[in-house]
Amino acid sequence: MKAALRSRMPMIAFAVLMSACGGSDPATSAPALSGSSTPEADAALAFGPDIVIGADQARFHGGEPSLQIGRSGTLWSTDVGPAQIWKSSDRGSTWTFVAPPLSIGGGDMDAAEDGAGRLHVIDIVEGSINPGTCAFYYRSSDGGHSFDIVRATHGGGMWSDGDGGCASGGKKGSVDRPWVATFGDNTIYLTYIDPAGGGSVDISVDGGQTFSHASIGSFLHPGGMAVDPVDGTLYTAGIEPGVYDRRNVGQWVRVQTWQNGQLVSSSTVFDARQFDAAAGGYFPSVAVDEAHNVYVAWSDNSAGTTDVYVSVSRDRGSTWRTPTRISRNQTVAVYPTIVAGAQGRVALAWYGTSDRATSRGDAAGTSWFVYAAQSTNALDSTPTYSIVKVSDEPFHHNSICRGTAVCEGVATNTGAVPPGYEWGIADFFRMAIDAGGSLVVMWTDTAHPDGPKDHVARQIDGPLLRGSSLPPMLTQKIKDINAFTERRTSTNRSSIISEGELNAYVQQWVRTQRTTLVDPTVTLSGTNRFTVRALLHRGALGRVPLTIAGALATHDGTARLTVESATVGNAPVVDRELERLLDTVFDPARVGIDLRAPFPLPARIRETHIDGKQLVILQ
């Protein structure tokens, strides 16, 4: 049956992309699909089903996943159980492992992509090898296939090629908790705890080839960093430690502002000397919106319960508003992570429990969930936040012992933990904004038999944090394809659309349609083969996962798409039921192509090929 079933679906991506090509006005056909858009006004914030990273690879464990989304929509994540770099170009539906260049890393990791598409990774020596001796910096200029820069530092901004002798002992110190961020094509920021005292900021303006060095000072251990998306100003946030007396571990939440490699200001966001600003973890999270407003999120116990708070600065980190309590009806809320988009639009996520507990280290019998909150008026004097569970299932049970002196009455300085403890939760997790303005959350799950594993979920409803637009490079590619139609030439040309660009296009297209499909993604899965995944409205059944695998064949300006398999939920769909399903989810009139039979390719396209993770278009 598989050869006879011709899909009316592009598999959604191919048809909508072809509909953008061959438009009568090459100057406007691409922008017509790339303008800002938002979901319906009354749609509430919601997330789709979570996806497990490395589910079929037992040697990888989660703990403290980082998450960053690059210019073309590529998702990058790192974790440390063991050293891991993960890449997804289909919005998190599938993940590819990227091996770090040094086998001795994996103590702490972070990754970011710059505007030129290069990957930058920061790492430290794995604890069982030679803890606290070195930080490592890796750069890949080919999407993680290889690393063209590998360097190490013992602190103080002195970088040397290779592993710096760290595997064999080397210089002892306490290089710890590094972070990386980028601005534009060539500016790279690295921060880390430095044995020379306090923290360090290392800055490159040549894409990671060389770095200058500055000291944060001894008062602030960098717990997070963010870059102004407009002018590149760097903000570092941290909690100044207090006396470790089980009452006041963190005394102040502080932020530093850096411009052109120079420290501009240092300010106190929250004075917690009567409380504990580290009650919910040691890493405050900082974000900057497109109008230069700065937001910091942390947890403290000032209300009698451990709650998540946000403070905002409207003068680039010089002064701060009174904190707003975000978490509600929870006994303990910890590990907040925050992101910002357009002016006054922010979102954050945290680990929380509503069960009886006095702290994250005194939470026997509890179930923990990942929560997310979103505000479109965070600059108002009384901002409002919508709060939802990212996943309906708990990700952890009982206490979170990481960083506690006593956990459920057990002294942890000897490595002991309470009976039945679920290992795996480390120091943080992360949220990011994708190219279409939607939220993506990644966390570690210890509650399931395969745990601890990192999970990821995407926003499928609710306001966007920023306007949806296509990556500029993709917009230009579509314009060039269309413009070729108008030329009188006998020469040939080819264009390459990456899997990430294809998914950015589909994500935006579906927001402009009235369709039963929600959150479609396309995975290019082999030579001229692909898989479409989405959620499908099924009446009283709600949203049900839909998966369709197909093949693409083109020749001499004609294309044919076939469906090879389809499932709704876990049930296969075949024959006439499949045809009815495709009729329901896709109307050929909406993209101007009838896929019931072989159809002509637009814009003088002769052939297309799916080659690895890219669509090649030949004109």
Image: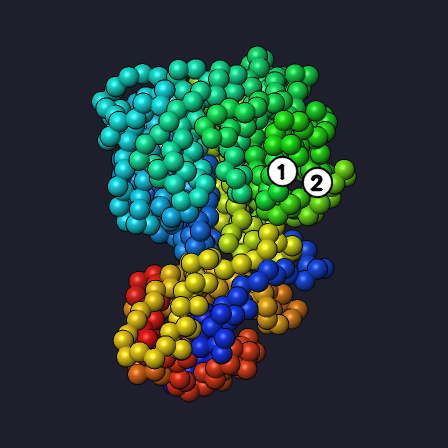
Q: Which residue is drawn at the image coordinates 71% and 45% (left, top)?
A: 377
The quarter of the image holding the C terminus is bottom left
Is 387 left or right of 585, judged from the image as shown? right
Local crowd size for mark 1, using a 10 Å CA cut-off: few (<14), some (14–19), many (≥20): many
Say if 285 sits above or below 470 in the image: above
* Residue contact between numbered discs 2 and 1, judged by CB atoms under 8 Å: yes
Q: Tell me the number on the disc at residue 293.
A: 1
Residue 43 coordinates in the image, percent (x, y): 68, 59
> Which residue ends up furthest to the right in the rendered image?
382
Residue 382 coordinates in the image, percent (x, y): 77, 39
Is 324 left or right of 69, judged from the image as shown? right
Residue type, label 2? Leu
Is 231 left or right of 388, judged from the image as shown? left
> Which residue ends up furthest to the front in the rendered image?
488
- Give the structural element (helix, strand or loop) at label 2: loop
Local crowd size for mark 2, using a 10 Å CA cut-off: few (<14), some (14–19), many (≥20): many
427 and 298: which one is in front? 298
Residue annotated with mark 2: 379
Q: Which residue is drawn at the image coordinates 43% and 26% (left, top)?
A: 201
Does the rendering let one see residue 365? Answer: no
347 and 494: which one is in front? 494
Q: Which residue is drawn at the image coordinates 64% and 45% (left, top)?
A: 343
Gap between marks 2 and 1 measured at Cα? 9 Å
Does the rendering let one see residue 31? Answer: yes
